[in-house]
Amino acid sequence: MRKPVSIETYVEKIKPIIRRTKFSQLKVDDLAKYMDISKVTLYKHFSSKDDIIERVVDYYIDYSKKADAMAKDDSVSFLDRFQITFLQSLMCAMYISDLFLQDLKEFYPHHFENLSVALQNRNKSLQTFFESGMEQQIFNRLNAVLFMVQDDAVLRRLIEPSFSIQYDITLKQAIMDFYHMKKYQLLKPEFLKMIDDSNMEGKIVHILQTIS
């Protein structure tokens, strides 16, 4: 017997679309096409277009909460958490795009407010994480807020198609170079020798493939 398709599967299918196309401008027929299902099947899973955007926002809020929990998880080493939170920041910058946020704010203000709260909570936990690493003498002393905001600002710029064209660099290389810059900014020399980057490129490539 075929396993029923989860709501999350349909959300995953439209994530790459709504990061670059305003959800408010998409019709139900468009959404069904991108989900690769019929309109009839779509209405078996979603009661309306508004229901779809609510599920999408709930999906992103859940992701933000998981990222928030990871930043707080003291059972994971500071070095591993640095890598994981970087990858999570890349995911957030890619899918919770400026276009998506602007569209939410204008047409779905309630959802915009809920998502904004979840993202703000994650940012507060990230700030605490970086400051804790500084207190533990693992991270260099720097402005935790600026270090955190740098991720969001730079990653959003890097994933713009015009960036790779303007500077003749692949998106993968730009993200990898930025990761190494962040690493050298943050980690004290003795911990730079300890961090294991062997899987970072593969994880970054996997994330980038979801928008190609």
Image (cartoon, rainbow, N blue to C red):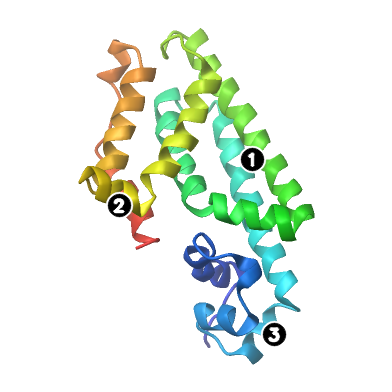
Residue 44 tag number: 3
Task: For marks 1 and 3, give the CA distance.
Answer: 31 Å
Residue that label 1 marks? 119
Residue 43 tag number: none
Residue that label 2 marks? 205
Closer to the chain start, of discs 2 and 1, is: 1
Image: 117 above or below 4: above
Give the image location of residue 205, x and y in percent.
Answer: 30, 52
The answer to whether residue 51 is visible is yes
Label 3–label 2 contact, CB within 8 A? no
On the picture, is 161 further left or further right than 113? left
Label 1–label 3 contact, CB within 8 A? no
On the picture, is 144 further left or further right than 188? right
Please, what is the three-letter code of the amino acid marked with disc 1? Leu
Task: For marks 2 and 1, give the CA distance.
Answer: 24 Å
Q: Residue at x 26, y 46 (%)?
A: 166
User: Who is closer to the viewer here, 80 or 67?
Assistant: 67
Q: Residue at x 54, y 80 (%)?
A: 3
Give the image location of residue 128, x and y in percent.
Answer: 59, 21
Image: 8 above or below 151: below
Give the image location of residue 84, x and y in percent.
Answer: 44, 37
User: Who is closer to the viewer here, 117 or 66?
Assistant: 117
Element assignment for label 2:
helix
Q: Residue at x 69, y 48 (%)?
A: 115
Please, what is the three-letter code of the amino acid marked with disc 3? Lys
Element assignment for label 3:
helix
On the picture, is 48 further left or further right than 61? right
Crowdedness near tag 1: few (<14), some (14–19) or many (≥20) residues, C-alpha within 10 Å = many
Please, what is the three-letter code of the amino acid marked with disc 2? Val
User: Who is closer to the viewer here, 162 or 136?
Assistant: 162
Image: 80 above or below 157: above
